[in-house]
Amino acid sequence: LAGVIRGGKIAGLQKLEFRSKPGLSRDVGRELGASLTHSQVCLSSLRELVFGEPIFMGGQAAQGEGFGSFLSALVEGPNTLPALEMVINQYHFNQLCRICLDEAGCQAVAKGITEKKFPSLKKLHLDCRDVGPVGVQVLGVALSSPHASTLRSLSIELGFNLPGAPAAPGEVGMFSMALASGSLSGLHELFVETNFDIEGVRALCTGLSSFKLSSLRSLNFSFFHLDPEKVRELAQVLDAEKLPCLQDLNLSRHPQFPIPALGNEGLRILSDAWLQRTPPPLEKLGLRRAGLTDESAPSLMALLGSGRLRFLAAVDLAGNEFSDPIWEMLKAAFVCVRESKR
C-alpha cells in the first residue's frame, strides 16, 4: 500500500481508515506514514485519517510507539496534506489494548499543526492518556498557536492507561491554557472524555471561563465522570456570558461505560445555578441515562418552567428512572420533553 501511494497510483485518495487489526510492525507503520507526504506524490484530496483499532503488533506500548512512528514519518516528509480536515484516533474507554499516541506521536501532531503540514485541519480527536506531561505540553503549545485556528471539533483524551485513573491536573491545565489562548476561538465542538479529579475540573473550568470560546456550540460530557462536586464547579462556568453560543450540552451517560452520572443532586445544583444566572442559549440538553429519579422532578420542573431556557427545543430524558405519573406530567407540561423516549 505504501508503495502504491508513493507511486502516485491513488493520487485521488480521500480517506484512509483502519477498522481492523492488521498487526503492522513499527517499521511498516513508519513507511506508510512517510508515503503520505513523499516527495514524489501530493495527496491533495486526502481529507480523513481515522484509526479505530490497535493496528500494530504487540501490546499497549507497541501501539503508541507504532502510531508515533507513523505520525513522525508523516510530518517529516517534504510534502503537505493540504486538504486534510480530520485526524481521529477513536476513543476506547475500557479496551486494554487500544490505538493511542505516545510522546513522539504527540510531538508529531504538534509539528504538523505549527509547520502547516495539514493547514485545513478541522477535526482533531486524540487519545493522549499515555503521552505524559512533556508531550501534552508540546501539544498544548501547538493548540495555542495561530495555526490551530482552523479547528472546529476537538477531543483530547487525557489521563493514564489504568482504568479509572484520573488525568493529572497539570496536564489538564496545559490543555486548558490552549482553550484560553484565543487560538481556538473558532471551535464549534468540544468533547471532554476522561476522568478528572476535582483539581482537574477546576483547571478545565479556567479554559471554559476564559471568554475565548465564543463560537462553541456543542459541549459533550457523555464520557466524563460526573459527581455533585464536579457539577458545582462546572455550573459556575456554564452560562451565557462565558459561552454565548452554546446550543447543545450533553450530560448524558454513554450506555457502554459504567461511569458516575449527573444524578439528582447534580441536576439540582445545575438548575439552581441557571435560575440565578443566565444559562447559555441551549437548544438541546442531553440527560439520557443521567441517573435521574422522581426526586429530581422539582428541580427539572422549576428549571424548564422558569422560561430561562427559552430556546430549548429538546431535552433527552431517556433511560432514567421516572415513575409513570412523573413521566406523563413532564411530557404534558413541557413541549421540549414530549419527543423524548422513555
Image (cartoon, grey):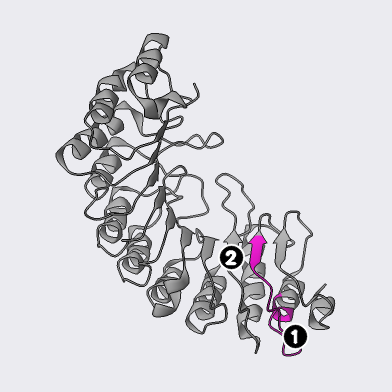
Q: Can you name the residue that lies furthest to the top here? A: 325
Q: Quadrant of the N terminus?
A: bottom right
Identify the amino acid type marked 1: Val
Residue 165 disc label: none
Query: In the image shown, does 28 or 240 lie closer to the viewer?
Result: 240
Q: Position of residue 316 (x, y in %)?
A: 44, 31
Give the main secondary structure of the magenta stretch: loop
Residue matched to label 1? 41
Identify the amino acid type marked 2: Met
Query: In the image shown, does 43 or 165 lie closer to the viewer?
Result: 43
Span highlighted in magenta in the image: 33-50
Taking the image as drawn, is residue 270 in sight?
A: yes
Residue at (17%, 43%) from the top-left corner? 277
Residue at (70%, 65%) from the top-left corner? 15
Crowding at label 1, few (<14), some or many (≥20) Cα neighbours within 10 Å?
Answer: some
Query: In the image shown, does 198 or 76 lie closer to the viewer?
Result: 76
Left or right of 85: which side holds 189? left
Q: Secondary structure at mark 2?
A: strand
Q: Position of residue 7 (x, y in %)?
A: 83, 83
Residue 86 disc label: 2
